[in-house]
Amino acid sequence: MEEKVISLPMIALRGLVAFPDTTIQLDLGRKKSIAALKNAVDKGSSVFVATQKDLSVDNPTPQDINKVGVICRVVQVTEVANDSVRIIINGLETAEIIDYINTDKFFYVTVSKQEYAVADSIEVEALLRRARELMAQLGLSSTKTDKDFLIRIAGIYSPNEYVNMVANEIVYKDDEKQDILQTLDTAQRLAKLCSILNKEVEIARIDRKIATRVRRQIDKGQKEYYLKEQIRAISKELGEDEDEIAELEDLVKKAKMPAEIEEKALKEVRRLSKMAPSSPDSAVIRNYVEWLTDLSWNNKTDDNKDLKKAKEILDCDHFGLEKIKQRIIEYLAVMQLTGGLHGPILCFVGPPGVGKTSIVKSIARALDRKYVRMSLGGVRDEAEIRGHRRTYIGAIPGKVIYMMKQAQCINPVLLFDEIDKMSSDFRGDPASAMLEVLDPEQNFSFVDHYLEVPYDLSNVLFVCTANTVESIPAPLLDRMEIIELSGYAEEEKIQIAKQFLLPKQEKLHGIQEHSVRITDDALRGIITRYTRESGVRSLEREIATICRKVALGIVNEGITGFEISDDNLESYLGIAKFKNDYIDTKDEVGSATGLAWTAVGGTTLTIDVTLFDGKGEITLTGMLGDVMKESARTAISLVKSRAREYGIDPAVFQKTDIHIHIPEGAIPKDGPSAGITMATAIMSAFSHRAVIKKVAMTGETTLRGKVLPIGGLKEKTLAAYRAGIRKIIVPEDNQPDLKEIPKEVLGDIDIVLANDITTVFDNALARL
Ligand code: ADP
């Protein structure tokens, strides 16, 4: 019978637990271990191996070593360098140290062999199956399990052999291994193994999940990197990418932007360099950087400081307008002294074609500055002024920055044309953005939504034009100095045509200067029969028509000298568009001629009143504004209060309906200045006295018949004159304005100053 207790040399293992039924390879370095091995090899005996409890101990004593270990057969011994030996041993069976015989040179111990116990073989069988299942799962889910090992254990049916082999291969922690080694009840050994395997399966599952996630991330990153590299390689082949980035960087540096803006631009370029050139984002960034580089950040042109020269330039471009030119020169003088533009913004107001735009162009020429023009007509969105944020698709800067890019300097003359035509809607109020642009306190750091960086507008000379001041938003108006340009009288127009428009059109049509002669009579004919305007735009157009015909004559027939007189005017311009005296000369009951002042200058306006049998109701038609409706009612009450003086039976008002109509209904009309005209028409209708058609009138009236002053007298007078009217009734308080009216007009027209409605009626109503 085999002996149960034997004495053997012992090797203490560090960080390793041996199991029966397994092959173990280990390197021995400690002297005691090598001596023990030598003893065994010499005697041809087995060795006992047991694991030390703490692997950091170098020279363990019996207390440091686990009592249970494994008896092993030495299979192979190989000497490795420096007193180190590599051995391969086979685990045979478990044994427990009973005694240490020698501990001096090497451990020599007496051990007692141990046997496994099986209490319930069914339970063992069940646990073994479970363990096998778990191993199979682990084999599937863990990449770490050795496939050879899996094949090997598949053929093992002895439960303890199975436990030993699996514990040796799979169990990770030394103390768990030792626990299994020490346990002798087979069912318990299997149960412990199963619980560890369970844990390992779970760990493998989580491990696999993490691995998949990491791999997916790496895969995606790699794919993108790979594609980007490919695009880059293609662009490089085409010579695009690198050159473009370097070029952009160069442009940014050359643009001489303020440091922080340059830094931002360079940052955008760096972002761009990391992107695929074909991506939509890169187009957005490139566009943005190009905007920054295209703008001028510090290029300032030198102003002409010679005010005499400036005046000469203004005179050379425009006829008359003396007061306005003088004001401009004063403005330039202040600008020179203060070295800045702290004064109010000049705003030229007047009907179309009076030279508002061209005078601003002249200012730029006189100052030797660049000129840019921005039309505000129809602008209703704040973004048009201030741009869209870059996050919008297709965003661009606002018009102000666009104009500055066009100007290519920081101090142009910027004309805001038609500032009165700006409106606002739900998209925001452009006026508030304009306020920021025009306000010297804020405009040195104007921020466009698209640019995102401040741009200095404080060197820009802003000038505005408008047809009327009424529709300019009040806060803007507050910052402006209004300079009015009213229309021109006939004589002025003739001079403008002779001195400016004709030479200009000759040049434009390639006709030698002075080869076209238009007599004064012909010009007068054009002014009265072909145009009806305050300014000279249509006049210029008619002269252009003449020049076209002249050009044709020169080319076709070789004619050199042309004289256009009133007689041959029709052959150039066709049939006259207006009759000279277009106001009906026949006096009528209930129809009076008023004078109005609209955005396009002065005009005559007829007010018709018709009466019906009825109940005293009032009807007003012709697109009248609220103020005009009120003055109609005032006029009716006034007429009622004066009824007896003009022989009207007051009872008639109860039985009569009144309809007041002002023709040309498409044009909205408002303002109080038609008051006396309405009162006259109504009085005429009730008193049956006709209104003298050759008389026109303008003035506000109170309920008690006092005539109040009105605006735009010069415009209105000129309009009446153009219409062939030679007598006008105006409020007495407007007398000071008469001096603005050209002398030739004043000399030709009879002006009646009225203080009370009686004066008006007396002069306007024909005798019965
Ligand atoms: P606005 O801006 O007031 O509508 P513009 O400035 O466009 O008018 O003027 C229309 C044309 O009339 C231009 O060709 C301009 O040169 C000419 N013009 C207007 N006023 C004068 C003037 N006083 N002297 C010479 N040309 C004039």
Image (cartoon, helix red, strand yellow):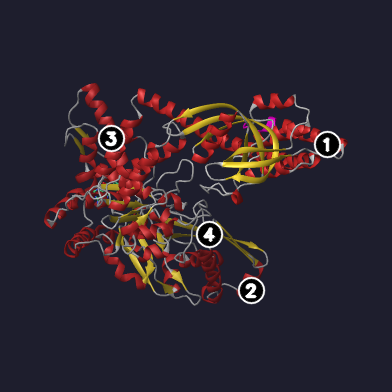
Marking on residue 624: 4
343 on left or right of 107 = left
Q: Residue 715 occupies which quadrant of the picture?
A: bottom left
Marks 1 and 2, how far apart in space?
Answer: 130 Å
Q: Position of residue 536 (x, y in %)?
A: 30, 47
Q: Nearer the viewer, residue 571 or 59?
A: 59
- Find the magenta span and give its range: 138-144
Q: Earlier in the sequence, mark 3 or mark 2?
A: 3
Q: Position of residue 688 (x, y in %)?
A: 54, 64
Q: Earlier in the sequence, mark 2 or mark 4?
A: 4
Which residue, given by chain and number where applicable, does mark 3 sit on?
A: 546
Amino acid at circle 4: Leu
Q: Which type of secondary structure does the marked residue at label 2 adopt?
A: helix
Amino acid at circle 2: Ala
Q: Earlier in the sequence, mark 1 or mark 3?
A: 1
Q: How many badges with numbers are in the image?
A: 4
Q: Is residue 767 visible?
A: no
Q: Residue at x 31, y 67 (%)?
A: 737
Q: Is mark 3 within 8 Å of ligand 1?
A: no
Q: Are marks 3 and 2 in contact (CB under 8 Å)?
A: no
Which residue, given by chain and number where applicable, does mark 2 sit on?
A: 651
Q: Position of residue 414 (x, y in %)?
A: 30, 51
497 on left or right of 188 = left
Marks 1 and 3, how far apart in space?
Answer: 122 Å
Q: Residue at x 34, y 43 (%)?
A: 291
Q: Which type of secondary structure does the marked residue at label 1 adopt?
A: helix
Marking on residue 124: 1
Amino acid at circle 3: Ile
Front disc: 2 or 4: 4
